[in-house]
Image: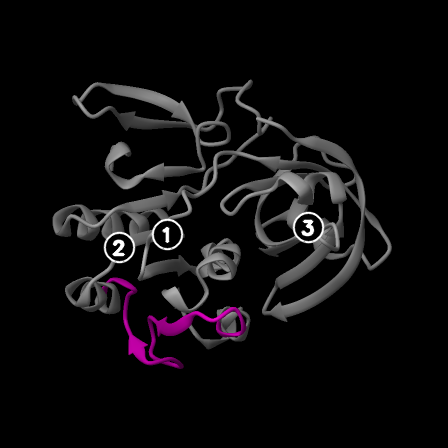
Amino acid sequence: MKYTQGKYPIMEKQAIAEDTFSFTLLCPEAAAIAAPGQFVHILPAGFGLRRPISIAGIDREAGTLRIVFAVRGKGTKALSELRQGDAMDTIAPLGHGFTLREDAQHVVLVGGGIGVPPMLPLAAYYGERSTAISGFRSFPQVILQSDLEALGARTILCTEDGSVGAVKGFVTTPLEQLIQEGVDQVHACGPMPMLRAVAQLCIQSGVPCEVSLEERMACGVGACLGCACKTKTADGEEKFLHVCKNGPVFRAEEVCW
Protein backbone atom coordinates (compact mmCIF):
# COMPACT_ATOMS: atom_id res chain seq x y z
CA MET A 1 0.00 0.00 0.00
CA LYS A 2 1.64 3.21 -1.19
CA TYR A 3 0.84 6.46 0.58
CA THR A 4 2.35 9.84 1.34
CA GLN A 5 2.33 12.07 4.42
CA GLY A 6 2.53 15.84 4.48
CA LYS A 7 0.93 19.10 5.46
CA TYR A 8 -1.13 19.88 2.39
CA PRO A 9 -2.60 23.35 1.75
CA ILE A 10 -6.34 23.89 1.46
CA MET A 11 -7.07 25.30 -1.99
CA GLU A 12 -10.84 25.60 -1.58
CA LYS A 13 -13.36 25.34 1.25
CA GLN A 14 -17.15 25.26 1.00
CA ALA A 15 -19.99 24.70 3.45
CA ILE A 16 -22.33 22.52 1.38
CA ALA A 17 -25.01 21.57 3.94
CA GLU A 18 -25.80 21.65 7.62
CA ASP A 19 -22.44 21.02 9.40
CA THR A 20 -21.04 19.50 6.21
CA PHE A 21 -17.93 20.82 4.44
CA SER A 22 -16.00 20.28 1.23
CA PHE A 23 -12.24 20.86 1.10
CA THR A 24 -9.85 20.63 -1.84
CA LEU A 25 -6.26 19.80 -0.88
CA LEU A 26 -3.17 20.35 -3.03
CA CYS A 27 -1.26 17.07 -2.74
CA PRO A 28 0.15 16.01 -6.13
CA GLU A 29 1.94 12.92 -4.81
CA ALA A 30 -1.24 11.53 -3.25
CA ALA A 31 -3.50 12.53 -6.15
CA ALA A 32 -1.22 10.71 -8.58
CA ILE A 33 -1.84 7.34 -6.92
CA ALA A 34 -5.31 7.72 -5.35
CA ALA A 35 -8.21 5.50 -6.42
CA PRO A 36 -12.00 5.57 -5.86
CA GLY A 37 -12.90 4.15 -2.45
CA GLN A 38 -9.68 5.09 -0.70
CA PHE A 39 -9.51 7.57 2.17
CA VAL A 40 -7.26 10.15 3.81
CA HIS A 41 -6.25 10.25 7.48
CA ILE A 42 -6.11 13.78 8.87
CA LEU A 43 -4.67 14.96 12.21
CA PRO A 44 -6.50 17.98 13.66
CA ALA A 45 -4.15 20.39 15.44
CA GLY A 46 -4.04 19.67 19.17
CA PHE A 47 -5.44 16.13 18.87
CA GLY A 48 -3.70 12.79 19.22
CA LEU A 49 -5.73 10.69 16.79
CA ARG A 50 -6.32 11.16 13.09
CA ARG A 51 -9.76 11.26 11.45
CA PRO A 52 -10.46 9.05 8.40
CA ILE A 53 -12.30 10.84 5.59
CA SER A 54 -13.28 9.33 2.25
CA ILE A 55 -11.84 10.73 -0.95
CA ALA A 56 -14.60 12.55 -2.84
CA GLY A 57 -12.62 13.73 -5.85
CA ILE A 58 -9.33 13.02 -7.61
CA ASP A 59 -7.82 15.52 -10.06
CA ARG A 60 -4.45 14.18 -11.16
CA GLU A 61 -3.83 17.05 -13.57
CA ALA A 62 -4.35 19.70 -10.88
CA GLY A 63 -2.72 17.52 -8.22
CA THR A 64 -5.68 17.80 -5.84
CA LEU A 65 -7.90 15.61 -3.72
CA ARG A 66 -11.38 16.60 -2.57
CA ILE A 67 -12.80 15.51 0.77
CA VAL A 68 -16.31 16.01 2.13
CA PHE A 69 -17.13 15.42 5.80
CA ALA A 70 -19.74 16.15 8.43
CA VAL A 71 -18.95 17.55 11.87
CA ARG A 72 -19.34 14.60 14.23
CA GLY A 73 -17.22 15.64 17.23
CA LYS A 74 -14.44 17.90 18.45
CA GLY A 75 -11.90 16.65 15.90
CA THR A 76 -14.01 17.20 12.81
CA LYS A 77 -15.21 20.49 14.33
CA ALA A 78 -11.59 21.65 14.49
CA LEU A 79 -11.04 20.58 10.87
CA SER A 80 -14.15 22.46 9.76
CA GLU A 81 -12.75 25.68 11.21
CA LEU A 82 -9.65 25.61 8.99
CA ARG A 83 -9.56 28.16 6.19
CA GLN A 84 -8.31 28.35 2.63
CA GLY A 85 -4.52 28.53 2.75
CA ASP A 86 -4.23 26.56 5.99
CA ALA A 87 -2.55 23.14 5.87
CA MET A 88 -3.97 19.75 6.82
CA ASP A 89 -1.62 17.14 8.30
CA THR A 90 -2.62 14.26 6.04
CA ILE A 91 -1.69 10.67 5.22
CA ALA A 92 -3.06 9.69 1.81
CA PRO A 93 -4.23 7.68 0.01
CA LEU A 94 -5.03 4.78 2.31
CA GLY A 95 -7.04 1.58 2.06
CA HIS A 96 -8.27 -0.80 -0.59
CA GLY A 97 -10.69 0.87 -3.01
CA PHE A 98 -13.52 -0.16 -5.31
CA THR A 99 -13.08 -2.51 -8.26
CA LEU A 100 -13.67 -0.57 -11.47
CA ARG A 101 -15.65 -2.57 -14.03
CA GLU A 102 -14.70 -1.43 -17.52
CA ASP A 103 -17.14 -3.97 -19.01
CA ALA A 104 -20.15 -2.89 -16.91
CA GLN A 105 -23.03 -1.29 -18.80
CA HIS A 106 -25.14 -0.27 -15.79
CA VAL A 107 -23.63 0.36 -12.36
CA VAL A 108 -25.60 1.54 -9.33
CA LEU A 109 -23.88 3.76 -6.77
CA VAL A 110 -25.65 3.70 -3.40
CA GLY A 111 -24.71 6.31 -0.82
CA GLY A 112 -26.26 6.99 2.55
CA GLY A 113 -25.60 10.32 4.27
CA ILE A 114 -21.87 10.98 4.41
CA GLY A 115 -21.45 7.78 2.38
CA VAL A 116 -22.44 9.76 -0.72
CA PRO A 117 -19.06 11.59 -1.21
CA PRO A 118 -17.05 8.45 -2.13
CA MET A 119 -19.58 7.81 -4.92
CA LEU A 120 -18.30 10.88 -6.81
CA PRO A 121 -15.03 9.32 -8.10
CA LEU A 122 -17.06 6.31 -9.22
CA ALA A 123 -19.52 8.56 -11.05
CA ALA A 124 -16.54 10.25 -12.71
CA TYR A 125 -15.37 6.85 -13.96
CA TYR A 126 -18.71 5.35 -15.04
CA GLY A 127 -20.43 8.54 -16.20
CA GLU A 128 -23.69 7.85 -18.03
CA ARG A 129 -23.38 4.15 -17.27
CA SER A 130 -24.17 4.88 -13.61
CA THR A 131 -27.25 5.52 -11.51
CA ALA A 132 -26.63 7.14 -8.13
CA ILE A 133 -29.12 6.43 -5.36
CA SER A 134 -28.61 8.77 -2.40
CA GLY A 135 -30.35 8.45 0.95
CA PHE A 136 -30.68 11.08 3.67
CA ARG A 137 -32.80 11.60 6.77
CA SER A 138 -34.19 14.94 5.62
CA PHE A 139 -33.69 17.90 3.30
CA PRO A 140 -31.02 19.73 5.40
CA GLN A 141 -28.61 16.79 5.04
CA VAL A 142 -28.87 16.46 1.23
CA ILE A 143 -25.53 16.93 -0.55
CA LEU A 144 -23.78 16.47 -3.89
CA GLN A 145 -26.74 15.74 -6.15
CA SER A 146 -25.73 18.35 -8.74
CA ASP A 147 -22.14 17.06 -8.57
CA LEU A 148 -23.26 13.55 -9.41
CA GLU A 149 -25.43 14.81 -12.27
CA ALA A 150 -22.54 16.88 -13.66
CA LEU A 151 -20.48 13.70 -13.88
CA GLY A 152 -23.16 12.05 -16.01
CA ALA A 153 -24.88 9.89 -13.41
CA ARG A 154 -28.65 9.56 -13.26
CA THR A 155 -29.66 10.52 -9.72
CA ILE A 156 -32.39 9.15 -7.47
CA LEU A 157 -32.84 11.02 -4.19
CA CYS A 158 -34.44 9.34 -1.17
CA THR A 159 -35.32 10.95 2.16
CA GLU A 160 -36.74 9.12 5.14
CA ASP A 161 -39.27 11.88 5.88
CA GLY A 162 -40.14 12.59 2.23
CA SER A 163 -39.16 16.26 2.57
CA VAL A 164 -37.40 16.19 -0.80
CA GLY A 165 -36.61 13.70 -3.56
CA ALA A 166 -38.48 11.19 -5.64
CA VAL A 167 -38.62 8.51 -2.95
CA LYS A 168 -39.89 8.69 0.61
CA GLY A 169 -38.14 5.89 2.40
CA PHE A 170 -34.98 3.87 2.00
CA VAL A 171 -32.49 3.38 -0.85
CA THR A 172 -33.41 -0.29 -1.18
CA THR A 173 -36.78 0.57 -2.78
CA PRO A 174 -35.35 2.06 -6.01
CA LEU A 175 -32.40 -0.36 -5.89
CA GLU A 176 -34.71 -3.35 -5.99
CA GLN A 177 -36.51 -1.91 -9.03
CA LEU A 178 -33.25 -1.21 -10.85
CA ILE A 179 -32.00 -4.74 -10.18
CA GLN A 180 -35.14 -6.10 -11.79
CA GLU A 181 -34.40 -3.96 -14.86
CA GLY A 182 -30.77 -5.12 -15.01
CA VAL A 183 -27.65 -4.11 -13.06
CA ASP A 184 -24.07 -5.28 -13.61
CA GLN A 185 -22.50 -3.94 -10.41
CA VAL A 186 -23.46 -2.18 -7.18
CA HIS A 187 -21.08 -0.04 -5.10
CA ALA A 188 -22.29 1.20 -1.71
CA CYS A 189 -21.16 3.28 1.25
CA GLY A 190 -23.12 4.45 4.28
CA PRO A 191 -24.42 3.37 7.69
CA MET A 192 -24.15 -0.31 8.55
CA PRO A 193 -27.93 -1.02 8.54
CA MET A 194 -28.15 0.41 5.02
CA LEU A 195 -25.14 -1.58 3.82
CA ARG A 196 -26.56 -4.76 5.32
CA ALA A 197 -29.86 -4.28 3.50
CA VAL A 198 -28.15 -3.43 0.20
CA ALA A 199 -25.78 -6.39 0.50
CA GLN A 200 -28.56 -8.86 1.29
CA LEU A 201 -30.65 -7.62 -1.64
CA CYS A 202 -27.73 -7.95 -4.05
CA ILE A 203 -26.67 -11.37 -2.75
CA GLN A 204 -30.23 -12.70 -3.09
CA SER A 205 -30.43 -11.28 -6.62
CA GLY A 206 -27.00 -12.49 -7.70
CA VAL A 207 -25.73 -8.98 -8.43
CA PRO A 208 -22.04 -8.28 -7.66
CA CYS A 209 -21.84 -5.78 -4.83
CA GLU A 210 -19.00 -4.00 -3.03
CA VAL A 211 -19.49 -2.13 0.23
CA SER A 212 -17.30 0.49 1.88
CA LEU A 213 -17.45 0.08 5.65
CA GLU A 214 -17.36 2.97 8.08
CA GLU A 215 -15.26 2.29 11.17
CA ARG A 216 -13.32 4.16 13.84
CA MET A 217 -9.59 4.05 13.10
CA ALA A 218 -6.45 5.01 14.98
CA CYS A 219 -3.40 4.26 12.82
CA GLY A 220 -5.03 3.85 9.40
CA VAL A 221 -2.39 1.39 8.17
CA GLY A 222 -3.31 -1.88 9.92
CA ALA A 223 -0.89 -1.67 12.83
CA CYS A 224 -3.13 -0.91 15.82
CA LEU A 225 -5.79 -3.61 15.17
CA GLY A 226 -8.52 -1.19 16.26
CA CYS A 227 -10.77 -1.48 13.19
CA ALA A 228 -11.17 -5.23 12.91
CA CYS A 229 -14.09 -6.51 10.84
CA LYS A 230 -15.42 -10.07 10.92
CA THR A 231 -15.37 -11.60 7.46
CA LYS A 232 -15.70 -15.04 5.89
CA THR A 233 -13.96 -16.81 3.03
CA ALA A 234 -15.67 -18.56 0.13
CA ASP A 235 -15.56 -21.87 2.03
CA GLY A 236 -17.17 -20.33 5.13
CA GLU A 237 -14.08 -19.83 7.29
CA GLU A 238 -14.46 -16.76 9.49
CA LYS A 239 -11.58 -14.36 10.11
CA PHE A 240 -10.98 -10.78 11.13
CA LEU A 241 -9.60 -8.24 8.64
CA HIS A 242 -8.74 -4.59 9.09
CA VAL A 243 -11.09 -2.01 7.58
CA CYS A 244 -8.24 0.48 7.13
CA LYS A 245 -5.85 -1.86 5.31
CA ASN A 246 -7.88 -4.74 3.85
CA GLY A 247 -10.83 -2.41 3.26
CA PRO A 248 -12.63 -0.14 3.59
CA VAL A 249 -14.10 -1.80 0.49
CA PHE A 250 -15.14 -5.46 0.72
CA ARG A 251 -17.26 -7.74 -1.43
CA ALA A 252 -20.73 -7.98 0.07
CA GLU A 253 -20.48 -11.73 0.55
CA GLU A 254 -17.21 -11.38 2.49
CA VAL A 255 -18.73 -9.48 5.41
CA CYS A 256 -20.34 -11.28 8.36
CA TRP A 257 -23.48 -9.19 8.59
Separation of marks 3 and 2 at Cα, in angstroms: 28 Å
Number of other residues with Cα within 10 Å of mark 3, as a class: few under 14, some 14 to 19, many 20 or more: some
Tell me where residue 166 appears, x and y as whole percent: 33, 81
The Cα–Cα distance between marks 3 and 1, rounded to whole angstroms, is 24 Å
Q: Is residue 246 above or below residue 167?
A: above
| Contact, mark 2 vs mark 1 (Cβ under 8 Å) | no
Q: Identify the mark at residue 188; answer none if there is no mark.
A: 1
User: Does residue 152 belong to the magenta stretch?
Assistant: yes
How far across and how far down the image is residue 43, in percent? 71, 37
Q: Residue 254 sits in which quadrant?
A: top left
| Residue 145 belongs to magenta span | no
In this rendering, the answer to whether 15 lies above or below 99 is below
- Residue at x 49% of width, y 73% of height: 145
Which residue is at a point 52% across and 22% down the rendered structure image? Answer: 222
Q: Earlier in the sequence, mark 3 or mark 2?
A: 3
Label disc, if present, on residue 184 of the rendered structure? 2
* Residue stretch rendered in magenta on the structure: 149-172
What residue is drawn where x is 36% and y is 37%?
Answer: 250
Question: Tag 3's secondary structure?
Answer: loop
